Amino acid sequence: MPISPTATVTSLVAQLAEQLERRGVQVTTAESCTGGAIASALTERSGSSVWFEYGFVTYSNAAKHALLGVEEAIFEQHGAVSQACVEAMLHGALRVSGAAFGVAVSGVAGPGGGTPEKPVGTVWLSWGERDHRPHSSCFQFQGDRQQIRQQAVIQAVSALLGLAEK
């Protein structure tokens, strides 16, 4: 029997929580297309206040700029759904929050908004540790809006877990 996406997220968050608690560090999120779903998944776990303090939902470019310091030039040159944008979002979230680890996400969850260059399902993630070079990757998720967002959450929590296990 296949594991449900909810069970997968719950299991990943449990493992992440264990690693973060063991290391005594906190994590932050900077989200656009997921609209806070990553932070929600993390804080579903009782006791998450020990390792989660900040989550940023910056759906608009104006919010990304005002709260996370993403430069206007990034939107003009690369767009909000880009490696440059999610890396700047991550940097801003880590700077403001003081967390040791973070993840940032921006994408096209659909059903509209896609372009030939960035079709629906295009999601950029950046994750990393304070004062280290971030990891970034572009994903092409399939499905409807809810499925795309859920896949992004799973990938984000998995990426954080990979960092915390090092």
Image: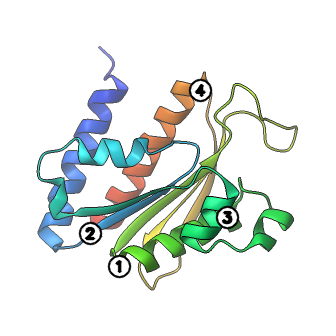
Q: Amino acid at mark 3?
A: Cys
What element does badge 1 sit on?
A: loop
Q: Is residue 155 above or below residue 93?
A: above
Distance from Cα at disc 4 to Cα at disc 3: 21 Å
Identify which amino acid the numbered label 1 is placed on. Gly
Residue extending furthest bottom? 131
Q: If you read the primary sequence from the N terminus, does the residue marked by circle 3 or circle 2 appear first?
A: 2
Circles 1 and 3: CB atoms closer than 8 Å: no
Q: Residues within 10 Å of mark 1 (few under 14, many from 20)?
A: some
Residue type at tag 4: Arg
* 3D distance between C-alphas at marks 3 and 2: 23 Å
Picture coordinates of residue 157 (x, y %)? 37, 50
**Residue corresponding to mark 2:** 26
Q: Secondary structure at mark 4?
A: helix
**Residue, disc 1:** 98
Is residue 166 found left or right of 145 in the rendered image?
left
CA–CA distance between discs 1 and 2? 8 Å
Quadrant of res 109: top right
Amino acid type, callout 2:
Gln
Task: Tell me the residue that label 3 is attached to.
Answer: 85
Q: List the single residue furthest toward the top.
A: 1
Figure quadrant of the N terminus: top left
Q: Check the image and report above or below for 67 versus 7.
A: below
* Relative depth, front residue between 164 and 36: 36
Screen quadrant of the C terminus: bottom left
Task: Assess disc 3: are there few (<14), some (14-19) or many (≥20) residues with their C-alpha within 10 Å of its C-alpha.
Answer: many
Mark before the other along the chain sequence, 2 or 4: 2
Give the residue at mark 4.
145
